[in-house]
Amino acid sequence: MEGSIYHILLVDDDEDDYIVTRDLLKDAERTNFQLDWVNTYELALATSLNPKYAAYLFDYRLGRNSGLELLQEVIQRGCQKPIILLTGLGDDEIDRQAMKMGAEDYLIKCQIDTHLLERSILHAIERKQAKEKQAELFEELKTVNQELTNFAYIVSHDLKAPLRGIASLTDWLISDYTDSLDESGKQMLNLLGQRTRRMSDLINGILEYSRVGRFNQNSIMLDPQQIIAISVKSLDLTTSTCVTIETDLPKLFANRTKIEQVFQNLISNAVSHNDKTEPKIRIGCIDAGKSWQFYVADNGPGIESRYFEKIFQIFQTLVAPDSSNSTGIGLAIVKKIIESYNGKIWVESEIGQGATFCFTLPKIEVIPEEFIG
């Protein structure tokens, strides 16, 4: 910043304070400041949007008005430059109000020296520029996300339309020409139908994966036991499948759809890859300090340790695509959801001993008032 000239506007109804502030800034060693001065509330409003100023210094007492009132009004008028409030006496309440209303700093006049004033102004300018840059990046990210959403749906529509046509044509051929086809022809048409449905499922999975974490979804108080019951019912499991909740499950403050996706995918995964005639699934939770550690365990074939990371990657499955309805997206969606809550997910397993999927979710530190009853 050395060599730059920073134009600063001081709003203060006391000329002596202006002179003191001017002299302090003249003594600044690292930065060249040019201080302008206005002594009324009205003049301050008239010059508050002048683009030449890098920062503003507002005195708290301005005749009938206050620096807080001025701060509020110039920000409402669109002032984007950093504002520092100056006061003769320290007051924590004024300090809090000023910072809440948008001031970048709050200085007590009797404590100000050249070094403190220079540092405060420079830091205020840097912070404001950082906030503006962050806001620009956030807007760019929103635009990119919207473009990705639009792209995903357009691609989905363009891909699924011909797939629906192929599926309909396949069904029509099987229905109307079954007597004219030999076994090989029937098998080929059935395989074509399976491949078409799999492609449709993959497209749906990609859309679902792309949506996770890109939308602000409302969080509510959730009872995981109810979520699990809904998930089990929606999966339409066979009567031979046993799902047991082994422990009390803590309430969660999260988005219902996301948590339903987590349990539904994990339970479905435990059932679909189970090699037993009577699949058994155990669900529970333990206290892990700052978070809750949930687990979904099964009595399936188990997973080799070399696949522990791979199974959470999108499109990765441990079986051949044609031998399973799995798209390889379910666990990737679960991982993305858990990580959106700053949680972790992993698997513990040995061959022949089943698999236990563990994940953490944060504890509720402060329950919103509307959920206290």
Image (cartoon, grey):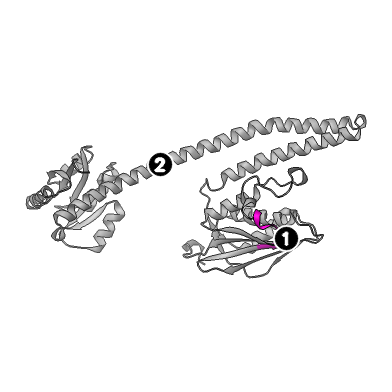
Residue 245 lies, with reference to residue 84, above or below; the image says below
Which of the two discs, 2 and 1, sits closer to the camera? 1
Q: How far from the left and from the top, in percent, is residue 217?
A: 53, 50
At x 65% / y 41%, what residue is drawn?
A: 204
Residue stretch in magenta: 296-306
Q: In this view of the protein, can residue 370 be seen by the observer?
A: yes
Q: How far from the left and from the top, in percent, is residue 320?
A: 74, 45
| Residue 163 is a magenta residue | no
At x 26% / y 44%, what residue is drawn?
A: 81
At x 77% / y 39%, what residue is drawn?
A: 194
The residue at which mark 1 appears reads as: 351
The residue at which mark 2 appears reads as: 137
Element type where label 2 sits in the image: helix
Element type where label 1 sits in the image: loop
Q: How far from the left and from the top, in percent, is residue 219?
A: 53, 55
Q: In this view of the protein, can residue 71 be seen by the observer?
A: no
Q: Front-most of 304 and 220?
A: 304
Q: Front-most of 151 and 68?
A: 151
Q: Horizontal placement of 315 versus 132: left or right?
A: right
Residue 294 lies, with reference to residue 165, above or below; the image says below
| Residue 303 is a magenta residue | yes
Q: Horizontal placement of 212 versus 245: left or right?
A: left
Amino acid type of disc 2?
Leu
Q: How far from the left and from the top, in percent, is residue 310?
A: 63, 51
